[in-house]
Amino acid sequence: MSLSDRSPATGLPDFADRTDFEDADRGLVAPPAGPVVTADDGRVVWDFGATAFLAGDCPGTAHPSLWRQSQLCARAGLYEVTDGVYQVRGFDLSNMTLIEGERGVVVVDPLVSAECAREALALYRAHRGDRPVTAVLFTHSHIDHFGGTLGVVEEGADVPIVAPRGLMEHAVAENVYAGTAMLRRGVYHTGGNLPAGPDGLIGVGLGFTASHGLPSLLPPTLDVTRTGQEERLDGVLFRFQMTPDTEAPSEMNFHLPERRALCMAENATHNLHNILTLRGAVVRDARVWSRYLTEAIQLFGDDSDVLFASHHWPTWGTDRLKTFLSEQRDLYAYLHDQTLRLTNQGHTGTEIAEIIELPPALAQAWHARGYYGSVSHNVKAIYQRYMGWYDGHPSSLWEHPPTASAKRYVDCMGGLDAVLDKARSYADDGDLRFAAQLLKHATFAAPDSTEAKELLARVFERLGHGAECGTWRNNYLTAAQELREGVKRVPIVAGSMASALSVDQVFDSLAIRVDGPNAWEHEVSTHWHFTDLGERHQVILRNGVLVHYRTARADASADLALSLTTPRLMELLAGGTGLDGIEHSGDPTALRTLLSVLDEPDPDFPIVTP
């Protein structure tokens, strides 16, 4: 691999510094009990042996900095953080934290899937006793921090489920409303379809990858609404700091003052995080992110001996953790402030991403490297938050869509053969970035050209092998895979989170699926009485829009009135037995009309081809 294949890496830190490795290994109680985690049907959802290759030296197909980070993330087992605080790491993309109380154990962030969470809890119990789960705590609204809930408690269990205010709203918005598109792009983001190994998946920066088990969500029973709020869970005092619009729209840190331990959720981990994740999300606020880190130092820094988070390994020592938090704070503040400074000088996001370099002190901090987020795409996200998609140049207002533009570019450049020749020339000269731009046009203009797709796949492969950012590597290599092999189906676990949705959220998700043009001529009014909730909802379809709202009384003018439970609603929408067994009055065809205009999302849409 030539130096030109590498993504930008200003002044790499000292590889001889083994502090992170010492911290990652500290406190190991026990490794995983078995080689794999399986689902009930025997399917492997997590393979501990998949990371074994990382024990070797960095090959030419990986950036040495990302290889080092992946080696650290590959550690797996039960670890003691401090007295009464344990973590299970390396069982999924995220960590599960277990805090021992008077009667049992409080589980914090139960991983992505129930299978992995169940196995993690079993490992803890095997070495710390068969303690019951006395509370579950979600630090924020991302699926790798609540998806394994049913692996540690049963639905309806009489234990408090604690979360920051707004978690349900934002968890549903991310995993249901735009869930299909995010899941599809998430395959690129996590490298979920790449083979593990030096040429393929080596990690995602935050961890190795996400597990492939059953995700779930139970609604919180105790909301944290303000900084300074205190709660005793199983006798343990938790002191909370609300941090909305940082790494997640709904997020919180917490401090255990009696154990001098600070949990930073995902607001301070051992890498530069995303201001806008490549799988898609709401743009985060780098300004408030940095300010909440300052507040955490002021609130908890002097009263903490250890800092841990929902990813990576802890940092021990008051001075060390305060330095860590200060550098993390400076990282997000610098990117925010310098992006706006250059914006106000007239630069666009793409231009600013080429200009900005981190200060030397931050560039030399291993935990500030761009393994998950990157300086380049974070700068563009900050620009997007303030300025939007429009770069200010009027030619950008009404551009042709990708395929139409590609055909015109290829025509201007003398046809497909000329474009391929030029792309080979740029690739041979080491300008892989422009070779990829040219070949994007070639593949969109001539999607059946095997030659164009293979050439672009080779360019993406080189870019991936040179990327320091794990998510960049996975995007490049997954694109190369799909150009050669076609789209691999995305496994979707239908309805695995449905039981946690409110009725409002269910109808919101239906409104997103209405095929507007096919619904223009329909006008239907339905009234829904949910007997288990004591709620009434009016649902009206008109002008291609599904409007819904709560109401206090039945509507005699509705075309159809139904009386049912929320579980029966889920069965009905899943294509169950129609109105059989549901009390109703009016015209049953109203429901058929409503359901007939719902579009089915496509979980396998193309990304690198038209």
Image (spheres, rainbow, N blue to C red):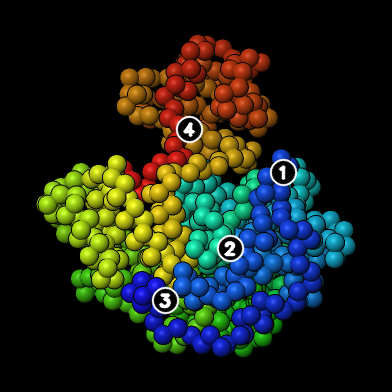
Residue 510 is labelled as 4
Residue drawn at point x = 79 percent, y = 61 percent: 33
Task: Name the kind of residue labelled 1 in the image.
Answer: Gly
The residue that disc 2 covers is: 208
Tell me, for residue 366, which label it has, or none: none
Q: The residue under label 4 is which amino acid type?
A: Leu
Closer mark to the observer between disc 3 and disc 1: 1
Q: Amino acid at mark 3?
A: Ala
Q: Secondary structure at mark 2?
A: loop
The numbered dot on residue 42 is 1
Horizontal side of 220 relative to 328 (left or right) equals right
For the N terminus, the image quarter is: bottom left
The residue pinned by badge 3 equals: 333
Does residue 259 appear in this view?
no
Q: Depth check: give the residue in front, 367 or 155.
A: 367
Q: Is residue 366 left or right of residue 125?
A: left
Q: Earlier in the sequence, mark 3 or mark 1?
A: 1
Name which residue lies at 33% across and 19% down. 521
26 in relation to 414, above or below: below
**What's the distance in space between the residues labelled 3 and 4, CA to CA?**
39 Å
Task: Identify the mark nearer the N-term, 3 or 2.
Answer: 2
